[in-house]
């Protein structure tokens, strides 16, 4: 989401490389670049100006702390102020109430609200071990209730099927009674999306709020709407006592303006962020981690936590044993690695959390295409078990059969075999647990205390 902003800010800080002190002129020059970067990211102008004033006050005449360079000093200040804009700490759901705790969802039509209901229910079930019931009070959009019912079945949570002819309030009241009868922990109520700020529709959702008395009223907003998201959130905030915001579609072509504007304008914390289409592509909003990602320092903690959740530990252990014992790393193993990568959001999802992405050449990140992963997996799937375990037997006729079955080109197969050979060599170097020697051979060799993304500020 922050790719362009990250590149612009990284270039700004690199421009201070070699300076021995932070003069007022240098700070102003850097802040002009920061201002342009934030405006291009569609951050609300009021947020930009206040942010720059705070950075300027802290940076002008700032003494260089310890071994930090001037660029690192300014970077540290900018990071702290970015965190302040988005919220100094992560804010979770407040569910301490007599069950069922009711969560009311609000937002414009097309913001991904119904999908977010399912994602939130899945997160509560998976991470909080809650028994969840979902209900739809959207009696206007065709098939809205059926959509939520389908999603609920996919994530295996209970769904309340209300009669749309009775009206939204009647459905909500009946859902609450059913939630009490089933002894569920959390009831999540979806509401009708609004095409715009509509008085009649706002009255309806206020009535729903009055009837349900929810502990959480979350505003769902499309991250791709930029600073307009903040304007809409403010209007909803005036009609409803919002408790938080959920950003959706952050994996799309979003410039980051919504994330940096919503909390400042509404005064309400961003509690969750949707980062993909799958039910588990949903995570708590961590201001510190997002600020680190914006500034090109990566987000290794989120990456590690995602790996803990999604990587099949038994399969990973099996591959690790093969590496340790020196047994061949075959194409079955490579296919498993590709699947694990895709489960973690694919190349884009992983690269977004790695340090140094802002310093890549223009277009480099775009070349890392998830479609290549899918093509490689399709090619491997078209092979026989014998071919996957011993690709050296692949001759012309075998290759033609594989390519025809996978709908791929000879370049795809050659690229796959080349990458497999490279991974085999890497596995052999790791034989016997000689991981440190391998790390030292990588570009920018990561010796002791130099693991990429270890939390240190980038050197400028």
Image (cartoon, grey):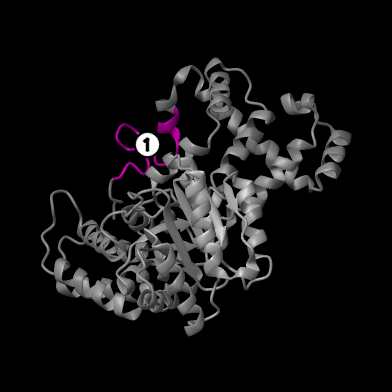
Q: In terms of secondary structure, where does tag 1 sit? A: loop
Location of the C terminus (image quadrant): bottom left
Total count of labels: 1
Q: Most prominent secondary structure in the magenta stretch?
A: loop
Residue in the picture at 16% in, 66% down: 22
Mark 1, other Cα within 10 Å: few <14 / some 14–19 / many ≥20:
some
Rendered location of residue 439, percent (x, y): 42, 32
Residue 350 seen in render = no
374 horizontally vs 305: left or right: right
Rendered location of residue 288, percent (x, y): 31, 54
Whether residue 129 appears in magenta in the rendering, the answer is no
Which stretch is magenta? Answer: 438-455
Whether residue 440 appears in magenta in the rendering, the answer is yes
Residue in the picture at 33% in, 68% down: 263
Look at the picture and state if 261 lies above or below 415.
Answer: below
Residue 160 seen in render = yes
Q: Nearer the viewer, residue 120 or 130?
A: 130
314 horizontally vs 220: left or right: right
Rendered location of residue 35, percent (x, y): 32, 75
Residue in the picture at 60% in, 44% down: 156
Q: Nearer the viewer, residue 292 or 225?
A: 225
Look at the picture and state if 233 lies above or below 316.
Answer: below
Q: Nearer the viewer, residue 207 or 386?
A: 207
Residue in the picture at 49% in, 38% down: 309
Q: Which residue is mark 1?
A: 446
Q: Nearer the viewer, residue 449 or 421?
A: 449
Rendered location of residue 423, percent (x, y): 59, 32
Task: Tell me the quarter of the picture where residue 12 sits.
Answer: bottom left
């Amino acid at each position: 989401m922050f790719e362009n902003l990250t590149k612009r800010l990284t270039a700004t800080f690199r421009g201070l490389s070699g300076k021995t002190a932070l003069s007022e002129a240098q700070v102003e020059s850097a802040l002009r670049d920061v201002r342009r970067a934030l405006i291009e990211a569609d951050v609300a102008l009021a947020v930009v100006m206040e942010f720059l004033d705070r950075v300027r006050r802290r940076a002008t005449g700032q003494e260089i702390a310890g071994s930090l360079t001037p660029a690192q000093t300014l970077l540290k200040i900018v990071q702290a102020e970015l965190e302040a804009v988005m919220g100094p700490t992560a804010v979770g759901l407040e569910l301490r109430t007599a069950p069922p705790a009711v969560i009311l969802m609000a937002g414009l039509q097309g913001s991904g609200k119904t999908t977010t209901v399912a994602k939130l229910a899945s997160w509560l079930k998976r991470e909080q071990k809650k028994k969840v019931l979902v209900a739809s009070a959207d009696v206007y959009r065709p098939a809205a209730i059926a959509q939520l019912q389908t999603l609920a079945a996919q994530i295996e949570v209970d769904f309340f099927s209300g009669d749309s002819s009775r009206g939204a309030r009647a459905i909500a009241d009946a859902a609450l009674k059913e939630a009490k009868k089933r002894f569920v922990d959390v009831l999540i109520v979806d509401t009708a999306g609004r095409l715009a700020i509509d008085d009649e529709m706002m009255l309806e959702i206020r009535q729903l709020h009055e009837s349900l008395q929810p502990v959480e009223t979350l505003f769902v907003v499309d991250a791709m709407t930029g600073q307009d998201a903040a304007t809409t959130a403010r209007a909803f905030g005036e009609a409803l006592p919002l408790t938080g915001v959920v950003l959706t579609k952050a994996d799309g072509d979003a410039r980051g303006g919504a994330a940096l504007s919503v909390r400042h304008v509404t005064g309400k914390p961003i509690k969750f962020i949707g980062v993909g289409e799958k039910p588990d592509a949903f995570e708590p909003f961590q201001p510190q981690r997002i600020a680190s990602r914006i500034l090109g320092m990566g987000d290794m903690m989120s990456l590690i936590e995602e790996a803990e959740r999604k990587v099949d530990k038994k399969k990973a252990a099996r591959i690790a044993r093969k590496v340790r014992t020196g047994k061949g790393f075959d194409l079955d193993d490579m296919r498993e690695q590709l699947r694990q990568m895709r489960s973690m959001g694919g190349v884009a999802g992983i690269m977004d959390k790695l340090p140094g992405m802002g310093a890549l050449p223009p277009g480099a990140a775009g070349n890392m295409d998830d479609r290549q992963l899918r093509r490689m997996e399709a090619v491997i799937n078209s092979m026989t078990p014998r071919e996957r375990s011993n690709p050296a037997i692949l001759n012309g006729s075998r290759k033609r059969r594989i390519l025809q079955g996978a709908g791929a080109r000879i370049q795809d197969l050659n690229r796959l075999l080349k990458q497999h050979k490279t991974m085999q060599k890497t596995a052999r170097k790791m034989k016997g647990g000689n991981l440190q020697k391998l790390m030292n051979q990588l570009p920018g060799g990561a010796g002791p205390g130099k693991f990429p993304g270890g939390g240190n500020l980038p050197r400028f």
